[in-house]
Image (tube, rainbow, N blue to C red):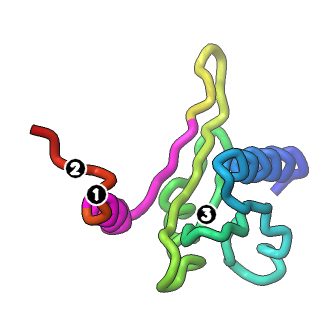
């Protein structure tokens, strides 16, 4: 991976950490991730395992797999993806997770009374 790609990835991780901090959630880039193996790109004090990817064609499925591997049994795996803008197309940002994890979150929100069926 070239230096430019590494800079883009680091900038995306910093932006994501900043967005978590803006919500009052402790978040730092995991600078030891390369040395320690796949342990997620961000260190959070909430049960999420984040794998960040950025590029013209970011590998979404690879990112989800890496997030799942880093999550273990405790964390919800999520890939946070930024596709670079090109021409007049703006960048696209996504959060992608396994479908089972999504429904676990929705179920927990319903059970807690945060989300209710309308009508």
* Residue 32, image x, y percentages: 83, 75
**Residue 102 on the magenta segment:** yes
Report whether 2 appears left or right of 57.
right
Q: Secondary structure at mark 3?
A: strand
| Any part of residue 99 in sight | no
- How busy is the neighbourhood of tag 2: few (under 14 within 10 Å), some, or many (20 plus)? few
Q: Secondary structure at mark 2?
A: loop
Residue 113: mark? 1
Residue 41: mark? none
* Residue 26, image x, y percentages: 72, 62
Report whether 104 appears left or right of 34.
left
- As drawn, which residue projects farthest toward the top? 88
- Determine the image quadrant of residue 90: top right
- How busy is the neighbourhood of tag 3: few (under 14 within 10 Å), some, or many (20 plus)? many
- Which mark is nearer the camera, 3 or 2? 2
- How busy is the neighbourhood of tag 1: few (under 14 within 10 Å), some, or many (20 plus)? few
* Residue 5, image x, y percentages: 80, 48
Q: Is residue 23 above or below residue 56?
A: below
**Residue 96 on the magenta segment:** yes
| Any part of residue 66 in sight | yes
Q: Main secondary structure of the magenta part?
A: helix
* Residue that label 2 marks: 116
Residue at image position (65%, 56%) is 52
- Are circles 2 and 1 on residues that touch, CB within 8 Å? yes
The quarter of the image holding the C terminus is top left
98 or 61: nearer the eye?
98
- Which mark is nearer the camera, 3 or 1? 1
Which segment is the magenta one?
Answer: 93-110
- Are circles 3 and 1 on residues that touch, CB within 8 Å? no
- Determine the image quadrant of residue 106: bottom left
* Residue that label 3 marks: 50
The quarter of the image holding the N terminus is bottom right
């Amino acid at each position: 991976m070239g230096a430019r790609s590494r800079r883009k990835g680091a900038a995306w991780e910093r932006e994501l950490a900043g967005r978590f901090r803006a919500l009052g959630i402790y978040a730092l880039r995991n600078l030891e991730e390369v040395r320690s193996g796949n342990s997620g790109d961000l260190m959070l004090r909430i049960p999420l395992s984040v794998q960040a990817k950025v590029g013209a064609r970011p590998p979404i499925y690879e990112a989800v797999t890496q997030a799942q591997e880093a999550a273990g049994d405790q964390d919800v795996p999520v890939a946070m993806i930024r596709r670079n803008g090109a021409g007049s197309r703006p960048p696209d940002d996504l959060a992608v997770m396994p479908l089972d994890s999504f429904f676990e979150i929705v179920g927990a929100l319903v059970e807690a009374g945060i989300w209710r069926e309308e009508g």
